[in-house]
Amino acid sequence: MTERLVLCCGTPGRGDDGVGPAVAARLRAMAVPGLRVEAIPGEATALLAALEAHADVVLVDAALSGAAPGTVRVIDCGAGETVPVGRTASSHGFGVAEAIGLARALGSLPARCRIYAIEAEDFTIGGSLSPAVAAAAARVAAEIAAA
Amino acid sequence: MADRTPKRRTIDVDVLARVEGEGALQLVIDGDQLRRCELSIFEPPRFFEALLRGRSYLEAPDITARICGICPVAYQMSAVHAMEDALGIAIPEPIRLLRRLLYCGEWIESHGLHIYLLHAPDFLGYEGGVEMAKDHPEAVKRGLALKKAGNDIVRCIGGREIHPINVRVGGFWRTPRRAELGTLVPTLSRARDLALETVRFVGAFDFPDVTRDYEFVALGGAGEYPFNEGRVLSSRGLDIPPRDYERHFAETHVRHSNALHSHRIGAGAYLTGPLARYSLNSRLLSPLARQAAADAGIGDTCHNPFRSIVVRAVEVLYALDEALRVIDAYQEPEAPFVEAPTRSGTGYACTEAPRGMLYHRYRLAEDGTIEEAKIVPPTSQNQPSIEDDLRAFVPAWLHLPDDALRHRAEHAVRNHDPCISCATHFLRLEVQRG
């Protein structure tokens, strides 16, 4: 079985930016065979290195697109879909969108690469997940585990 | 009679916010005259100064690190050195070397990112690093490999690559074993080769033939290329200890920017950062870095801001050379940190962030509680000089169409790697014609 890497981006304690780590925690608790789960800040260089080294990658990150909080958008990068730059709400200026764009330009995008972009509501420092986003984290974790 | 009112062009460049650095640029042009040039930066370090009041001196490095996701080490280093100045702590040589090594990591990370993904696209005619990667994949891979080598250093010593958690007043919470640092050597040796290629790569770009008569300000006089130590020197003869910084430099509020503007009292705008560090300390670079600079056409000093990309590449090469030297010389300290009783007093420090000198001052109560904090980041110090660059260069570009003029102006701003350059993809241009 090919190992599937799940990269959960974000920083706990920054409100809904912690949704990635929250999904990671749920997936780890499920102990799904063949699934490797990593919680990372979302820095582009580290993401690129991970993308290069795996054929099947799932990314989870908070997003801001104007949709209702907790809305989950799945972007199938492996099928050619692009990530809107500036829409993802990573806590760094050079994050998921840039990493995907660079990996595609450099020919190192994994054959299977999907992003779960979870619409965020609040990024208050010291804050926890808003209810809609916490519920979305549970749904996304279950969907990834079942895929 | 023909209308002789000059045609007015207003070029606004707004930056949509992300976390690090929010800024905007406005040029107002009447006919062939540049009437106004304003760079606005909305970076809010003053909130941190207030946030620090009432906190323990031990918390300053971790709190101030959060000011910047690209150069957290700089904030940590200025914070711990200022606290050690206040408490009379002298750090042993292995700790000093480890801090130098940690700073090397940050310079490599920050400069590597700026050179390849933020600044090189300006020279090669691309909107950004992603577009450039399609035509120059090997160059971008080189930049990413350099960034990763810097990350490896910061993670090894600091615990993680962004906002490291291992820096402590008096030293580190935990110091690495020699063998742990040894694992970095193969990566850093390869990265040093890539850094040499980088100097050659950027040295071959086309540069506008311009210079400015900057007053350069950087640390120096410590017998080594500066990171954490030295006196504050200027190219016009200033030579002071960091504790005298506020006697010679002042910040003033300007209407168009949330960041204060710094100037040297009685002198005016000055420049800190790679051009200043290099021009005041180039003889202290390693032989490899000096030779690479000479081969790339950079003399002992550099007054052309467009060539700052070459100087950054030389600093990356030096940082890798220095990192390997430090790892070879490192002896594990007896204790990871030096402790001293708290006391009331004031501590001062300047260190060299990738973008330039970073000044911290803290006043402590008897029990080590921070009563007052002052932080002067490099972008605030460079802002007047960046505007002066535009005032000096834009008149020669006024014949250009708005798009080309906007690009040249943005390029000139990015020469100094202010925090807003990390938002290279989020610029919006508005042109209003009279």
Image: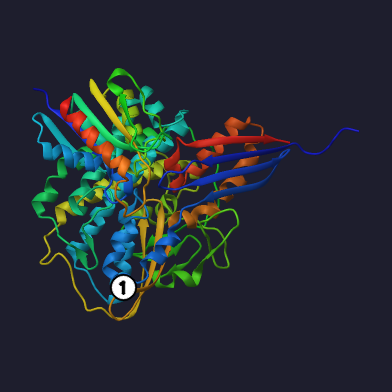
Task: Name the spot of residue B203 as percent of width and height, x first.
Answer: 40, 36
Query: Which residue is at a point 23% across and 42% down the rendered structure image?
Result: A21
The image shows residue B246, relative to residue B393, as above or below, that is below
Vertical placement of A30 versus B180: above or below? above
Q: Position of residue B229 (x, y in %)?
A: 32, 64
Task: Indicate the quadrant containing the N terminus of chain B: top left, top right, bottom left or bottom right.
Answer: top right
Percent coordinates x, y for residue A77 in the rendering: 30, 23
The image position of residue A108, as x and y in percent, is 26, 24
**How many residues crowd around disc 1 within 10 Å: few (fewer than 14), some, or many (20 or more)?**
some
| Quadrant of the snapshot with the C terminus of chain B | top right
Which residue shows up at 46% across the image and 32% down it?
Answer: B123
- Name the residue nearer the viewer: B154 or B208: B154
Tell me which chain the residue with mark 1 is part of: B
Residue that numbered label 1 is attached to? B85
Residue occupying the point 40% across, 47% down:
B19
Secondary structure at badge 1 equals: helix
At horizontal 46% and vertical 30% (from top left) the residue drawn is: B127
The foreground one among B143 and B294 is B143
In this view of the protein, which residue sits in the foreground, B423 or A146? A146
Furthest-top residue in this view:
A79
Q: Nearer the viewer, residue B308 or B283?
A: B308
Q: Amino acid at mark 1?
A: Asp
Image quadrant where residue A42 sits = top left
In the rendered view, tell whether residue B217 sits above or below residue B205. Answer: below
